[in-house]
Amino acid sequence: MTKANESDELLSVSHVSASAGDKMILHDVTCSVGQGQIHVLMGPNGAGKSTLGHVVMGSSAYTVNKGTIVFADKDITSAGVDARSRAGLFMSFQSPIEVPGVPLNSFLKAIVAQHDNLDLKGKRYKKRIAEIMQQLDMDPSYLNRELNVGFSGGEKKKIEMLQLLLLQPKLAILDETDSGLDVDALDVVSRAIAAYRSSCDGALLIITHNTRILRDLSIDRTHVMVNGHLVAEGSGLLVNEINHDGYGRFIAEAEADQQ
Amino acid sequence: MSEQQKAQIDDVDRSMYDFKKSERGYERVSEGLTPDIVEEISAKKNEPTWMRDFRLKSLEIYNNMSVPDWGPSIDGLDMDHIVTYVKPNTDQKSDWEHVPDDIKDTFERLGIPQAERSYLAGVGAQYDSELVYHNVQDSVAGEGVVYSGIEEALHGEYADLIRSHFMHLVPPTDHKFAALHGAVWSGGSFVYVPAGVTLDFPLQSYFRLNAKGAGQFEHTLIIVEDDADLHFIEGCSAPKYNVANLHAGCVELYVGKRAHLRYSTIENWSKNMYNLNTKRAMVDEGGSIEWVSGSFGSHVSYLYPMSILKGRKSSCDFTGITFAGKGQDLDTGCKVVLAAPETSTSVQTKSLSKDGGVSTFRSGVTVTKAAEHANVSVSCQSLMLDDISRSDTIPAMDVRAEHVNVGHEASIGRIGDDMMYYLMSRGISESEASTMIVNGFANPVSKELPLEYAVEMNNLIKLEMEGAIG
């Protein structure tokens, strides 16, 4: 696998502060992800990891008070969510939303139609869907079911992975995609990530507590977030350290900083 | 998409329903409502004396009743300015080629002859006050099925049958506009399906009101005998005028033992229409009535199809959707009377409101003392698409029998930000995402419709949504 140059930046978050209502959540966050790189964002519960993902994706639940977000050489700080997706950004939701009455198949067709880079018309679309569903151990009858309605947690995550493989984004943010999954489902997610990497060499920002899905990945950078601050950044080895020692050191440092 | 482009799309699509034709050579009675006008209508139709007397009696009842005081305002409706009868310059034909060009063009633009050729067993088309076309496939007629104008049937072998059923389910005393209907009714279809006959394809009657300031009062009478099966589709539309138009039709359905009738309606009256329509079905032992009802048009609607389950184990399924946009106050729902043991009903409705529209779901379910072991399930969901629109649910239940199973659920909500965000995060635009959510919401209703009508319904929703965004 070819690694992109460190300076070949895909996503660059500069000094971003963001709030939800009156509550400040992210404080002066700066980080960047290069083309094709794998980054991991770790931190204790409630640190603001998912918020960072949603702020990059453009959720209207958060207000960016300060800073800029540049993706694929464009300032997307105030771009619409749909425009960000069309530019090649993807986020796998921790809790995918149920949309009653909308068949999965129509939804997938609709999203494919929004992405000009995909050449998936007619038969090619069908073939590709069948291919991915087989890869992910998904029953083809899922296509006729309503989007995420009545699916188990594991099935919903598979539907997220199906979309990831279909859209082949430049950067995929995986928000705790592995949480609450059994071993089989974790395997499927790991396979999906590997397939995504090999099909388009897309970059990843993985938000996780769990290191199982990281096991087979070559991680370029690890970021640690505590109380809305990015407090540490290091190589993939940092994952092992946290795995071993927990967040105690980072929390203590953050508290010391704030005093 | 720019504002201008949207407006253009809106205009083009509206033209599908909103186009007017000249009334040159048409007969019109004077505005308003007097015994003379009623007699004039009756005389033009050369109808039996009993019917003329029935009309005059209905007019008396009308004059002695007050307008309903519990629903949307109908102050804008001034009966002194409504023309109750407009006859186009043609008689009823059974070949589209013989229908005058501008009327034929109207129905072609609405897709009626095309639909007839591809998937209907028969079609009736009414233009203003009179039917201009009626035809039924020979094979269907050969099985003894009658599908004709109700007025022509008044003179034929079914005259007595009509006399013993006409406005017996919906008597003129039912409410003021039923009385009005009794006085000035004109046109409409008669269907008779003999015992044991199943129609493989639907019959469709389409009602088009072209005349400005006029009223349409068609009467639909359907008798489905024991063990027979029919799907009947009713469609209606009108161009928009700046004066009030009135629709006060009446539908009476008789469903025999173990018979099945599905009655589907897509109503798309223009937004100057007062739609004060009355529909009622009576179902015999083991029979079933299914209503599928889409209400998109009109300025004000009062519409509550009623089912009387008088035979043991008879049933009623009601599936409805109402979409109230700008300037619309749509009060819709249904009524069910369960009057025999082991009867059952299932009601599922969806109502939407946007741009200040008001959508009210009103239902009345009565379980009489006789209806032991009845099953009732009512579910109504409302979706408001913005902060200035309103949705209300007014469900009433009156249960007097023992051992009854009753379920009711209602929900009122708005389009969820989380749904919008999720769909948009996959590249779908804001307007498409909301249309997708609304179509999904309506899906349980549209999937009950034949494909072509489901497409029409989705188009109507799309049309309303395009006006809603931006």
Image (tube, coloured by chain):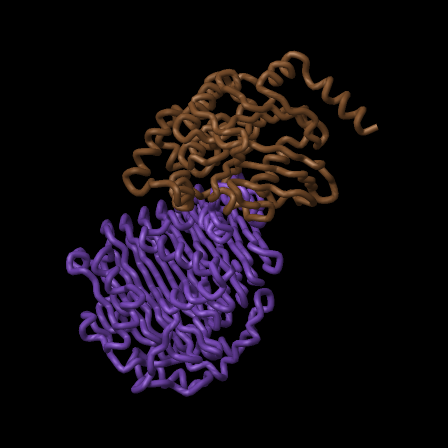
Chain colours: A brown, B purple
In terms of image quadrants, where is residue B5?
bottom left
Where residue B346 appears, x then y in whole percent? 46, 45
At horizontal 42% and vertical 80% (from top left) the residue drawn is: B212
Q: Is residue B148 left or right of residue A156?
A: left
Q: Is residue B310 left or right of residue A236?
A: left
Please identify the residue farthest to the right as the structure is shown.
Answer: A259
Answer above or below: position of B72 versus A106: below
At horizontal 47% and vertical 40% (from top left) the residue drawn is: A88
At horizontal 55% and vertical 72% (from top left) the residue drawn is: B74
Where residue B30 appears, x then y in whole percent? 41, 87
In terms of image quadrants, where is residue B150?
bottom left
Q: Is residue B312 visible?
A: no
Where residue B433 appears, x then y in whole percent? 48, 49
Answer above or below: position of B155 versus B401: below
Pick the front one: B105 or B371: B105
Pick the front one: B191 or B356: B356
At horizontal 33% and vertical 29% (from top left) the residue drawn is: A131
Q: Is residue B161 visible?
A: yes
Where residue B54 appears, x then y in whole percent? 39, 76
Please identify the residue farthest to the top as the structure is shown.
Answer: A244
Q: Is residue A16 left or right of residue B468?
A: right
Pick the front one: B318 or B176: B318
How many dots with numbers?
0
